[in-house]
Image (cartoon, rainbow, N blue to C red):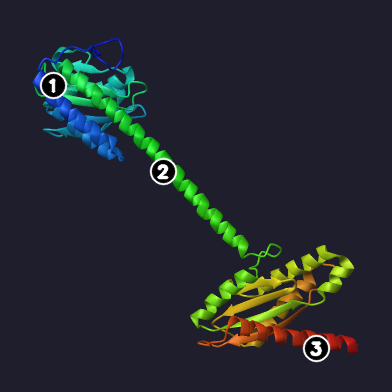
Amino acid sequence: MQGQGSDIPGTIAYTLPRDPERYFRAVEILLSAVQALSFTREPGQVQRIVKTAARQLTRSEGASFVLRDGAACHFVDEDAIAPLWKGLRVPQESRIEGWAMLNRQSVQIRDLTADPRLDASVYQPTFIRSLAVVPIRTHEPIGAIGVYWAEANAPTDDDLRLLIKLADAASLAIENIRIHGELEERVRLRAAELVKAKADIEELSITDELTGLLNRRGFRRAAETILASGSGCQIAFIDVDGLKKVNDKFGHTVGDSLIADCASVLRDSVRQSDVVGRMGGDEFCVLVQAPLAPAETLRNSLRTRLDYFNRLSPAQCTLSISIGIVQAKPGSNESLDDLLSHADALMSMEKHSKSMSESRH
C-alpha cells in the first residue's frame, strides 16, 4: 500500500486532467457537495453527502465513510451496488482505510490481486477489484473515505485529487459541527445559569434570611394562591411573647435565636403542604390547607410542640407564643387581609389576657 503523489501527505502533484470533460463534471459535483456540507449541522448528514458525492464524482461502484474509533475503523455509512461493511468495526491495521489514517496518506490500489501487502481475502467475496482511500484531515486523521471499483486499474490521479478535496470539505464540516455544538452547549449552560440565578434571586426575594421561612411577600403570594382555589384553610397569626424583654436583658443575638427557635417549632408543627411565614419582627403566620381540623386542634398541636421544645431546649429563656386562629370556609370570599386582620385581633386578645393574668400574680 503506497501513497501516490507529492511529498506532502494527503496530496498529489498537479497534472492536467486525463479526461477534462469528465473531470469538470466531477468538479461540479464536488462544488455542490462542498456547498451542502457548509450548511450541515448533523454528522449523519455529512456522512450521507460525502458517500454519495464520492461515488458520483469518481463513477465508482461503492463508497464508504469511515471514522476512527480508538484503535478501530468504524464503517459508519456506505453507498454501494451491494452491501459491504456498513456498521462494521475492525482493527485499523486490518484495513486499508486504517492504514491511510495511521500513515496520514492517500492510497491508490489499482489491482488488489497484485499487491502482496493487502489481505486480498477480505475483498475476495466482494465486487471490489481496485480502490482509492483518502484520510479525513491529514493531521491526526479522524476518518477516511474509501472508494471501490469492480474493475482493476480504475482509480486515476484525478479521482484521488477530487477525493482529497472532498475529504478536506468533510473535515471542515465536521470541525464546524464540533464548534457549533460547543457554542450551543455554552449557550445552553449560560441560559441554565441565568434561569437558576433568576430562580435564586426570586427565592431570596420571598425568603426570610434569619429563619429560612417565607417572608411577608412570599407568605402572601402562597396564601392568596390557596385562597383563590376556594378549598378553604385555617390561618394562625402568632406572636412571640416577651421578645423586647429578652432583647433588653440578653441582647439581640439571643432574641434572634428565640425567633429562629419559634420558626423551627412552627415548621415542625404542621404538614409539609402547609405554609409558614415570618411576617416581620416577632410575628409569624401559619396557613393550614384542607382537609381541616377544628381550630383548637391546630392550637393544641402548636402548644404541644412548643412544650416539647422548651423541655429539651438549653436556651437561656423559655419560648412562649400568643395565637389567633381564623378559618376560611370552602368557597369563602373573604380576602387575605380580612383574615389576617381578624387573626391578628384574636392573637392580641390572647396576649392581653396573658398580660392581665401575669399582673394579677
Q: Secondary structure at mark 1?
A: helix
Q: Quadrant of residue 289?
A: bottom right
Q: Three-letter amino acid code at disc 3?
A: Ser
Closest to the observer: 301 or 257?
Answer: 257
In this view, 233 is above or below 128: below
Closest to the observer: 108 or 35?
Answer: 35
Which residue carries the number 1 mark?
Answer: 23
Left or right of residue 53, residue 255 in this image = right
Q: Three-letter amino acid code at disc 2?
A: Glu
Residue 334 pos. (x, y %)? 57, 86
Residue 102 pos. (x, y %)? 33, 20
Q: Earlier in the sequence, mark 2 or mark 1?
A: 1
Q: Secondary structure at mark 3?
A: helix
Left or right of residue 99, residue 254 in this image = right
Q: Which mark is residue 353?
A: 3
Which residue carries the number 2 mark?
Answer: 184
In this view, 327 is above or below 110: below
Which one is closest to the eye, mark 1 or mark 3? 1
Q: Quadrant of the C terminus?
A: bottom right
Give me the C-alpha separation between circle 2 and circle 3: 66 Å
Q: Three-letter amino acid code at disc 1?
A: Tyr
Residue 120 pos. (x, y %)? 17, 19
Give me the C-alpha separation between circle 2 and circle 1: 39 Å
Which one is closest to the eye, mark 2 or mark 3? 2
Closest to the observer: 85 or 174?
Answer: 174
In this view, 149 is above or below 359: above
